Amino acid sequence: MKKWLLGALSLFLTAGMTACTNKTASSEEDDTPKINIVTAEDGYASGYATDVMRTAFFDFTVNSGYLTTSYDEYTPEEGNVFLVVDITITNTLNQSIPMFDTDFQAQWGEDEDPDAFTYSLTAYGQEPKGEMLPEEYELAINETRTGKLVYQVPANYHDFSVSYMEVYDNQDSGDLFFVYFTAQ
């Protein structure tokens, strides 16, 4: 799960795949908010903020995202801002799993731009501050963890996606997941 190739990401993006399965869980007898569970179909899944993305290893939800000119003591380079993504991850396996800061990538702009992506600040050597998820951590069986992923992005964008690609121990790639949202 550590790193995956941008080439694989570009292949999925340019192929224009749109297949995925959405399931809604709630009772019509109560006022419980509906939970949209998204699973991959034909290797691809896409959803929106607050959807539960169901991967082979864990469920994840991008709860929200916002733009800011500083995070804790960090400030972005000129012409950039920080995209702060609040994310929740739940281990759905019957064993602990390692997680890494490069598991989730942020994208913006046109799909054809191969440079319109980044990893969280910790992937570039920054120490986690506040509620930021660390560079590496382990999720225990059925553990849920909520934290922040902080990305440095160009200041002129407000529509983003966060993606995750399944990568198995033998380095084979699995399904690709995208969550789309507008950062406030």
Image (spheres, rainbow, N blue to C red):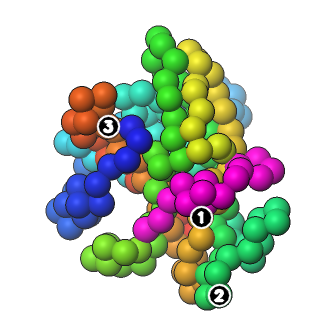
Look at the numbered disc 3 and give the secondary structure of its residue.
Answer: strand
As drawn, the residue found furthest toward the front would be 125
State how far apart marks 3 and 2 are (Cα). 34 Å
Query: Which residue does the image show at 50% across and 29% down from the upper left?
Result: 98
Residue 121, image x, y percentages? 61, 60
Label total for image: 3
Look at the numbered disc 2 and give the secondary structure of its residue.
Answer: loop
Front residue of this view, candidates 47 and 4: 4
Crowd rating for badge 1 (residues with CA inside 10 Å; few <14, some 14–19, many 20+): many
Front residue of this view, candidates 178 and 173: 173
Q: Do we see residue 36 in this rendering?
A: no
Give the quadrant of the N terminus. Answer: top left
Predominant secondary structure in magenta?
A: loop
Question: Position of 175 compared to 145: left or right?
Answer: left
Look at the numbered disc 1 and give the secondary structure of its residue.
Answer: strand
Query: Which residue does the image show at 80% across and 50% down from the upper left?
Result: 130
Bounds of the magenta span? Answer: 117-132
- The residue labelled by disc 1 is 151
As drawn, the residue found furthest toward the top would be 94
Q: Amino acid at mark 1?
A: Tyr
State how far apart marks 2 and 1 are (Cα). 14 Å
Above or below, 153 relative to 119 = below
Query: Which residue does the image show at 55% across and 81% down from the upper left?
Result: 154
Crowd rating for badge 2 (residues with CA inside 10 Å; few <14, some 14–19, many 20+): few
Query: Which residue does the image show at 58% across and 25% down from the upper left?
Result: 139
- The residue labelled by disc 3 is 167
Between disc 2 and disc 1, the foreground one is 2
Question: Position of 110 compared to 171: left or right?
Answer: right
- The residue labelled by disc 2 is 78
Above or below, 124 relative to 35 = below
Q: Amino acid at mark 2?
A: Glu
Confirm whether the magenta stretch covers residue 123: yes
